[in-house]
Image: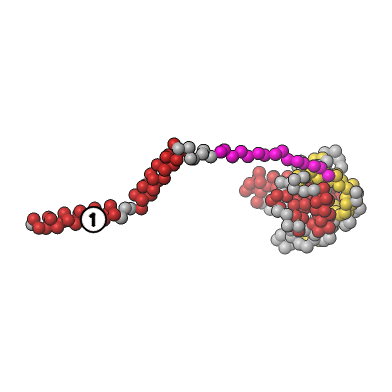
Amino acid sequence: MIMTSLCDQREVNKSKALADFHPSHSEVKARSFQSNYLSIMAKQSRGQVQPQAQKTVQITAPKLKTLSLKIKGTAPFVQLRFSEKAMKQMADKMEAGSTARGKKVREARDFDEDFRNALHESEDGWYGIPAGAFRNAMISACRLVGFKMTLAKLSVFVRHDGIDKVDGVPLIRLTGKPEPLRMAVRNATGVADLRVRAKFWPWSATVNVTYDSEQFTDQDVVNLFNRVGVQVGIGEGRPDSKNSAGMGWGTFEIVN
């Protein structure tokens, strides 16, 4: 019995010795931290360690410039806005809820009204093009020259001439006389339909582009806008249409 106790005690002492010789990972990290801390404190007391200087960030004001560009259409500009009547019908249906599911009475189609509703008209009575159409086109054209579109969104802007009387969309004043353009189309469901758009031909406009001069030069803006006129276009059936290759509409050239 005494011999067994002595053997057990020897095993315990041996385990303790091995633990001291092979410390755990956490013990190694603690000893290393303590050693580094003592070393840094000793160097600071001798003046060998200098405190880190604070870094300051300087933000400069944006250097914005504005360039006035006169453009003339090289193909018809075709417009089709989401009409006030359609918005009202959608709102009425949503407000009616389940009671709107009854049998729908089909009203006679007024194509003249469709034409008038297709136009963007300002609060002052003139027709216009959404300013965002030109800005979006410039951003899209940046893909052609390897300029990051995310930077372009922060660097180019279009100053509007007025506000749409229906939904408050900023507009660029459009010079030209609109006429109805009736064409057969297929809706998203595949059903054939007749759609009336507003066509301007000939047409012209003056677009004031504000840009970050630390990102673009005057010539950069002119060249970019030339690409918009030839390769991107604006309005319905433009070359850069999301749903098709376009109809060849909405192209233009700079004339100043």
Instruction: Let me know if residue 197 is in the magenta part.
Output: no
**Residue type at numbered disc 1:** Ser
Instruction: Let me know if residue 63 is in the magenta part.
Output: yes
Q: Position of residue 56 (x, y in %)?
A: 61, 38
Q: Position of residue 176 (x, y in %)?
A: 90, 48
What SS does tag 1 mark?
helix
Q: Position of residue 190 (x, y in %)?
A: 72, 63
Instruction: Quadrant for the N terminus, please.
Output: bottom left
Residue 141 visible in the snapshot: yes
Q: Which residue is mark 1?
A: 15
Image label count: 1
Q: Position of residue 193 (x, y in %)?
A: 78, 59
Question: Residue at coordinates 86% horizontally, 47% vertically from top-left?
Answer: 69
Q: Which residue, as the protein is rendered here, is positioned at the far front?
A: 46
In this rendering, the answer to whether 191 lies above or below 105 is below
Residue 167 occupies quadrant: top right
Q: Which residue, as the protein is rendered here, is positioned at the far left?
A: 1
Question: Residue at coordinates 66% horizontally, 46% vertically from top-left?
Answer: 94
Q: How is the image coloured?
A: secondary structure
Question: Residue at coordinates 77% horizontally, 45% vertically from top-left?
Answer: 213
Residue 234 visible in the snapshot: no
Q: Which residues are magenta?
A: 53-67
**With 92 as the anchor, is 74 left or right in this view?**
right
The one of 166 and 155 positioned closer to us in this rendering: 155
Look at the magenta stretch and give its main secondary structure: loop
**With 227 as the anchor, is 52 left or right in this view?**
left
The one of 13 and 100 positioned closer to us in this rendering: 13
The one of 36 and 133 positioned closer to us in this rendering: 36
**With 24 as the anchor, is 228 left or right in this view?**
right
Neighbor class of circle 1 (other Cα within 10 Å; few <14, some 14-19, many 20+) is few
